Structures are given as structure tokens and as C-alpha cells.
Image (tube, rainbow, N blue to C red):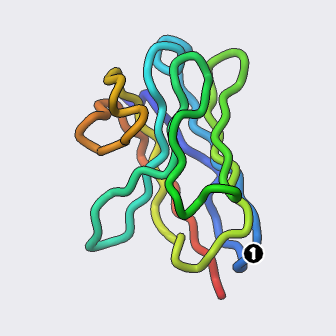
Amino acid sequence: QVQLVESGGGSVQAGGSLRLSCAGSSDILGHHCMAWFRQVPGKEREGVATISPGGNPKYLHDSVKGRFTVSRDNAKTTVYLQMNSLRPEESATYYCAAGRGYSGCFNPTPAAYTIWGQGTQVTISS
């Protein structure tokens, strides 16, 4: 059963923008910390951004501060990751995840998240 569905990935040139979406039920998005992770082959999955069950952004990776924004709609059914000024090294598969742990919202690690989407590919060309 697919509970989270990402969309919005694609190919852009360096400096461009993409907005990723993660759709799910309000039971999930309204009661879990939601996170965006990214992963490239051969590397560990890396936490990029989180937003609390209350809809408040809690974490941004240092490398994306000032460029990425995480948000959620009022209906609590979609979480977004707005990505601006994209860099080639940020090409990866981006995943949306949900977790109930409080600490995981401030320091996202994959083990703290129990519900995952299938991922969406982001490719940035130089």
C-alpha cells in the first residue's frame, strides 16, 4: 500500500528551480514529522528538510539554507520542497518520509522514519 507519493522531479540546468510534492493522507501528514531525504547511488540517504506535524519547518541541511524551503498545505495532504539555485551535485533521488519521533524532526536520520515514498529523480546539469 503506497502511503506517500512524490512528484515534481525532473531535469534542470544549474541555477534552476524545482518544486517537489509529497502527497499523503492528513492522518499521516498531520500526525508525523515529514522529511525530505536525498540519495545518490553508493551513498547514504541524507536528510534535507523536515516539517513538524503542526506545519512548522524544523530542519534544513546547511548546504540548502537560503535556497530550499519546506512547507505544507492547510489541508495537511501535501508537503512541498521548493528548491532554488540548484547545483549539479544535488542530483539525486529525493524521498519523502514520515516519522513519529520528536528528535528525528530536528536531526533526520532514515532510521527515524517509518513511512516512505517511492522517490522522485532530480537531475541538474552544469
Task: Provide residue 114's location: percent of width, then percent of height.
Answer: 29, 31
Q: Which residue is drawn at 55% across and 14% down?
A: 26
Q: In this view, does 121 lie above or below 35?
A: below
In the displayed structure image, the side of residue 103 where residue 119 appears, left or right: right
Q: Quarter of the image for the C terminus: give it.
A: bottom right
In the displayed structure image, the side of residue 29 where residue 72 appears, left or right: right
Task: Provide residue 37's location: percent of width, then percent of height.
Answer: 43, 50
Residue 109's quadrant in the figure? top left
Task: Provide residue 71's location: percent of width, then percent of height.
Answer: 67, 34
Amino acid identity at mark 1: Gly
Q: Which residue is drawn at 48% across and 55% down?
A: 94
Q: Is residue 120 above or below residue 5?
A: below
Q: Residue furthest left?
A: 111
Q: Considering depth in this image, is 20 or 86 the residue closer to the camera?
A: 86
Q: Is residue 37 above or below residue 79?
A: below
Q: Is residue 58 above or below residue 41?
A: above
Q: Considering depth in this image, is 40 or 55 the residue closer to the camera?
A: 55
* SS of the residue under disc 1: loop
Q: Which residue is drawn at 57% across and 65% down?
A: 122
Q: Residue furthest right?
A: 16
In the displayed structure image, the side of residue 75 where residue 2 appears, left or right: left
Neighbours of disc 1 within 10 Å: few (<14), some (14-19), many (20+): some
Q: Quarter of the image for the N terminus: give it.
A: top left
- Location of mark 1 (residue): 15
User: How many numbered marks appear?
Assistant: 1
Q: Residue at x 63, y 41 (%)?
A: 70
Residue 88's quadrant in the figure? bottom right
Task: Provide residue 81's location: percent of width, then percent of height.
Answer: 63, 46
